[in-house]
Image: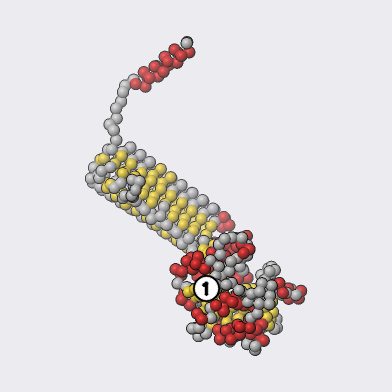
């Protein structure tokens, strides 16, 4: 038995009132279609997943091509049945097919596997995944031959329901398993005698049943995982549920999340046990946070790797960087892409880094910009220090050796290298390399003029008096 999965992703999603194809909208930090592909890829290899594209086909293909799936184009969108007809040639190598919708992002791999196993066990020509939501309005209903038994008579579209059928709470999810030979032997019997003049795949249930083929149904464990979204508001409900499900899973694994309804967690996020996440934190993309960390309120981490025992203070923004064990960051710090903080680094308030590596135990605690820099271990960067890495055309590196002390309000004009153990005097502008263990001073010699300030005040007072007497 060889199984293929076909994902229908050709529709426009008119009711979203959006220029983007429906499957290109996001929840949980991923495209709707990406969620479905990720679930399917845990059941079959990506090359056995075919995505039927139509509306904005090039954009959809570009968005998910890196997943390794294959594509079938439905040039004219004439319904779900027509979409599967378009995939006939590309599915010839499979004995069974599972058909998924590209806009059902909460579907779990376990549910796809349960559908597959039930389909094979029942030796069915068609197996329908159903659900019993609290409110079935708007969904087609599945009519079984006998209540409680697997065999199905037909699927009735919502608009065609009579009063008795509308009272049936079991809905059609639009997710199916087919024996491929039975499907394509009878798919030519689909008709367009409906309001939209389209070929509906749902009609295959009745067609196959009338042909004496076995059509069965299995109910999903959770109704929410088979629900799609036709409006932005409905999509945001799915987003809320997905993120809350992730929060519940993380809390079950030992993560403390205060006020989880305020925390934004993307689908790819991982957090170790005994980490504390305070309200209004955002963990985005493929962020990985270790154990025994604390992330304080209003911090945003995107595609970050964070080691164990890290403290991230309030209102930090960390992007595409790495933070190792024991580091302390913030408040109000900004790690731009390519930053790497080694063990026990301290990065304080209003410090920004970009493409910078700070060695173990180094610190920059106040009001500092470090860009395109390689900083050794045990380095102290004084308040107000900046690396001047850009000359208006190109970027240049700054290299700072171990145990360097950089005084406050210094400007290091790249390219420049500071040797191990060197000192930079406060307020210096450093334009040349500094040898190891040297003291570098890059400022004008101080001159004191005795009584200058007192004499100036006296002159100002005399001028005021002359002005008042005129």
- The residue lying at 31 percent from left, 49 percent from top is 396
Q: Residue at the far front: name it.
A: 76
Q: From what the image shows, is residue 428 above or below residue 81?
A: above
Quadrant of res 168: bottom right
User: Is 143 left or right of 260, judged from the image as shown?
Assistant: right
Q: Residues within 10 Å of mark 1 (few under 14, many from 20)?
A: some
- Determine which residue is flagged by label 1: 73
Q: Nearer the viewer, residue 284 or 76?
A: 76
Residue 49 higher or lower than 313, as above or below: below
- State the SS at label 1: strand
Furthest-bottom residue in this view: 212
Name above or below for residue 451 compared with residue 306. Answer: above
Residue at left 58%, top 86%?
A: 185
Q: List x then y, in percent, for residue 452.
A: 34, 21
What residue do we see at 54% from left, 53% from top? 279
- Does the rendering let one see residue 6? yes
How many numbered dots are placed on residues in this image? 1
Q: Is residue 404 left or right of residue 249?
A: left
190 relative to 324, above or below: below
Q: Nearer the viewer, residue 456 or 360?
A: 456
């Amino acid at each position: 038995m060889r199984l293929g999965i076909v994902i229908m992703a050709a529709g426009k999603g008119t009711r979203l009132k959006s220029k983007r194809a429906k499957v290109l909208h996001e929840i949980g930090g991923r495209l709707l279609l990406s969620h479905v592909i990720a679930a399917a890829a845990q059941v079959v290899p990506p090359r056995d997943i075919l995505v039927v594209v139509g509306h904005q086909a090039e954009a959809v293909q570009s968005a998910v091509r890196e997943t390794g799936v294959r594509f079938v184009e439905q040039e004219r969108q004439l319904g779900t049945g027509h979409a599967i007809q378009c995939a006939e040639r590309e599915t010839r190598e499979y004995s069974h097919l599972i058909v998924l919708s590209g806009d059902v992002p909460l579907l779990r791999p376990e549910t796809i596997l349960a559908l597959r196993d039930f389909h094979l066990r029942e030796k069915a020509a068609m197996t329908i995944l159903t659900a019993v939501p609290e409110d079935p309005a708007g969904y087609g209903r599945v009519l079984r031959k006998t209540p409680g038994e697997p065999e199905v008579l037909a699927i009735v579209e919502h608009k065609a329901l009579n009063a008795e059928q509308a009272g049936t709470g079991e809905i059609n999810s639009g997710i199916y398993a087919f024996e491929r030979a039975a499907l394509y032997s009878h798919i030519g019997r689909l008709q367009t005698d409906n309001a939209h003049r389209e070929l509906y795949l749902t009609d295959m249930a009745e067609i196959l049943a009338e042909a004496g083929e076995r059509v069965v149904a299995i109910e999903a464990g959770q109704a929410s995982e088979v629900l799609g979204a036709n409006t932005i508001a409905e999509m945001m409900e799915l987003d809320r549920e997905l993120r809350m499900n992730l929060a519940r899973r993380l809390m079950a694994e030992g993560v403390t999340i205060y006020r989880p309804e305020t925390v934004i967690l993307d689908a790819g996020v991982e957090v170790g046990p005994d980490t504390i996440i305070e309200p209004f934190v955002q963990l985005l993309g493929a962020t990985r946070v270790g154990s025994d960390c604390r992330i304080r309120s209003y911090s945003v981490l995107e595609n970050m790797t964070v080691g164990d025992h890290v403290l991230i203070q309030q209102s930090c923004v960390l992007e595409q960087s790495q933070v190792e064990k024991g580091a302390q960051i913030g408040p109000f710090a900004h790690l731009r892409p390519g930053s790497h903080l080694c063990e026990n680094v301290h990065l304080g308030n209003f410090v920004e880094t970009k493409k910078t590596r700070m060695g173990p135990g180094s610190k920059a605690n106040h009001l500092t910009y470090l860009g395109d820099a390689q900083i050794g271990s045990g380095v102290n960067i004084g308040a107000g220090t900046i690396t001047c890495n850009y000359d208006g055309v190109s970027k240049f590196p700054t290299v700072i050796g171990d145990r360097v002390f950089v005084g406050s309000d210094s400007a290091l004009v790249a390219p420049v290298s500071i040797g191990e153990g060197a000192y930079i005097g406060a307020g210096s502008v450093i334009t040349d390399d500094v040898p190891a263990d040297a003291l570098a001073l890059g400022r004008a010699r101080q001159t004191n003029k005795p009584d200058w300030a007192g004499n100036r005040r006296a002159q100002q007072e005399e001028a005021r008096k002359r002005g008042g007497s005129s």
